[in-house]
Amino acid sequence: MPAKLLATVEFQSWTMSAATSPSGSSDQGLRYRDAGVDIDAAERALDQSKAAIRATFGPRVLADVGSFGGLFRADGLGEEPVLVATADGVGTKVRIASAVGRFDTVGWDLVNHCINDALVQGARPLFFLDYIGVGRLVPEQVAALLQGLAAACKSHGVTLLGGETAEMPGVYPAGEFDLVGTLVGVVERRHILDGSRVQAGDRLLGLASNGLHTNGYSLARRIVEERMGLSYDDLFPGLSDQTVAEVLLEPHRCYLPLLQELLTHPGLHALAHITGGGVPGNLPRVLPGHGAEVSRTAVPELPVFSTLVEAGAVAKDEAWRAFNMGVGMILVVDSASEDEIRGRLEAAGEAVFALGQVTRTPGVQWLDASA
């Protein structure tokens, strides 16, 4: 695993909105807090998170939490190291976290999602930067978000290099927040996965998701709230031990532990992380000049998808564009290496499913269009 780097978190808050002093008199001097921004609250949130952030430090760390920027010792990263940077957000999944007051899982979502995005280009993660935006900063909530981010980073050998927490009344509604992050990884130039080795006849191996991951939540929330009439504290239909919130807040799966030893395998030609747009929106991104024949029925069914699709009367093609439908990652492998690669994954305890093959016709063609 790559050496860990510097973690720093800089808390800045800005934006002034019209406000009077607590006494209601407009002729008294205003404070920042009167305008809705509490700098002390930001400092308390950071104080509660420093230990978790420092736990991600490694020998490349050159400064402590609180610097204006992270310091990253970049020597010795490889012969021809190429940095891979990716940014994303948790999306409207944060609305569910806000609704139930649970803030410890979405940090895992964000880190895992970004790691997977770098992974598909052959990169191992180095460091992570976060942005948290809130309308009113509650220290315990922000600390839970930061601690979740730090725990996910530590779990995967990533350093929380820096971040920003912004309290912006009038921009974010009361009780709502946004969570965005950037991850930087590294790959040797000769091992970059860019689809250039993909050829017709390559096989597609699927790895399961563990739920919605971080996509399709605007549709999922509408189905749950309007079509099913459920609250997030209700039991999820068909399950006796998980609430709707617990099912929908299941963290985005990270495929780094499973795939990191395969990244330099000559038989691995490409990887596709199945996020927004589903299989038809993401698989073609790694098949330049090619397409694929894909079987829907090969994918193990996850009850969360069948329940949502049925309750929302979502058409099959629409469902496969809005949701991952049980596919979290797709490997594009040389046909001669298929059995070996599949065997290594299965030896690690993974249930691998054969999805189809690469073709010369661009786009995704469903082998079982009616399924």
Image: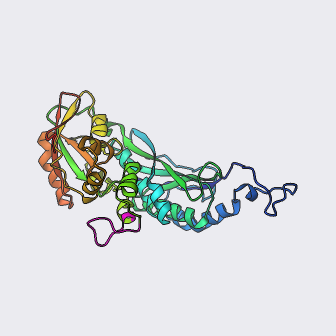
In the picture provided, is 285 more to the left or to the right than 168?
left
Camera-side residue of 251 and 330: 251
Magenta run includes residue 234: yes
- Residue 186 is situated, as x and y percent measured from the top left of the image, at 41, 44
Q: Is residue 28 left or right of residue 111?
A: right
Q: Tell me which residue sits at (33%, 38%) in the image.
A: 192
Q: Which residue corresponds to the image point at 45% horizontal and 51% vertical from the top-left?
A: 92
Front one among 224 and 287? 224
Task: Answer with the quarter of the image where residue 139 lies.
Answer: bottom right
Vertical order, 244 against 134 (above or below): below
User: Measuring 25% from the left and 41% from the top, which residue is drawn there?
Assistant: 317
Q: Position of residue 153 (x, y in %)?
A: 44, 58
> Which stretch did the figure color magenta?
233-245
Picture coordinates of residue 48 (x, y %)? 59, 68
Which residue of the protein is positioned furthest toward the bottom in this rendering? Answer: 241
Q: Foreground: 172 or 347?
A: 172
Quadrant in which the N terminus appears: bottom left
